[in-house]
Structure formats: structure tokens, C-alpha cells
Amino acid sequence: MRRLDVETAQKQQRALELRNLGLSYDRIADQLGYAGRSGAWNAVRAALDRALVEPAREQRIIADQRLDLLLQRVLPAVLQGDLDQVRNVLAIEKRRADLWGLDAPKGVEVTGADGGPIETDVGQLLRQRLAEIAGVPLTEQQPVALDVGDGDVGI
């Protein structure tokens, strides 16, 4: 495994930053002195690989960095009193929260039609379904036998 020198790592990071800005690989190659678009692509790929993330996270990281760039443009205006830019800051932060799932619900609560908890006897539901499959009526505590070919299964 070849050691990565600091200058190469910085150049690859700069390639990633330029890609985040939306530059084509051809343009990145021109700006950073790569022989062609494949060199620029390899540089961006290497920078992402060092982040040790899976592909879906890579796209989130790129999008998050773009949001940082946008925020850097509008936040100074807000801090200088331009309250019209507050909406832009909030939109950027809302997009970031959506991107990373920060506002996702913490759990799911299942309720009945009346809004109350649902109480279910899973065994009873299974007995009812098996009785339907077997084509037999089901009394309250009657066990159901279902022929599965190798023998009977009782519930």
C-alpha cells in the first residue's frame, strides 16, 4: 500500500470541494493539473474513500458540504441584520435536517380508531386465520389442526 503524502491528500480534497461546487471532472482536471477527467475522478473518489463511509453517506456528505457553502454565503447577512435572509438560513437548515433525518420521528405508536391502544391476542388472530384456511368454524378455545402434508399442526 502506497503512503499518501500531505500535498496529494490536499489536492484530492480540493478536487472533492470543486466537485461539491458542481464543477465537471474536466474542469477540475484543468484547474488542478490532472492529465484528464479520469485523474480528477480518481482524486474525488480517493477523498471520499478516506472518509470511510458507504455510498449513500457519500452523497449526503457532498450535499451537506454544499449546504455549508450556501450557509456561509447567507449567514453573514443575517448577522449584519438582514432579516430577509433568515428564511434562507432556515431553509438550508431544514434541508440539512431532512438530509440527515434529524427531524425523523423517534418511534411509532399504533392506536385504534378511537385513539386508544390496540390490544390484540395474537394467538387468537392466528387461530382465526388458520380456521379460515382450514375451512372450519372456530369456537372460543377450540384448537385448530391444519394438515401441512407431513402431519398435523395444532394451535
Image (cartoon, rainbow, N blue to C red):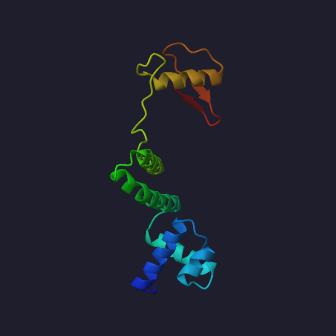
Q: Which of 149 and 104 is in front in this view?
A: 104
Q: Which residue, as the protein is rendered here, is positioned at the far top?
A: 139
- Whole-percent x and y of residue 107? 40, 37
Q: Nearer the viewer, residue 70 or 58?
A: 70
| Residue 129 in view here | yes
Residue at the location (40% across, 46% down)? 86
Residue 25 vertical position relative to residue 67 in the rendered view, above or below = below
Would you place residue 21 above or below residue 148 in this image? below
As drawn, 74 above or below 3: above
Task: Tell me, yes or no, if residue 4 can be seen here.
Answer: no
Residue occupying the point 44% across, 72% down: 50
x, y percent for residue 111:
44, 23
Left or right, 132 with respect to 99, comes to: right
- Residue 79 in the image: x percent, y percent? 33, 52
- 105 and 68: which is toward the camera: 68
Number of numbered discs present?
0
The answer to which of 65 and 46 lies nearer the viewer is 65
Q: Left or right: 151 with respect to 105?
A: right
Is residue 110 shown above or below 61?
A: above
Q: In which quarter of the image is residue 119?
A: top left
Specify whether 67 is left or right of 148: left
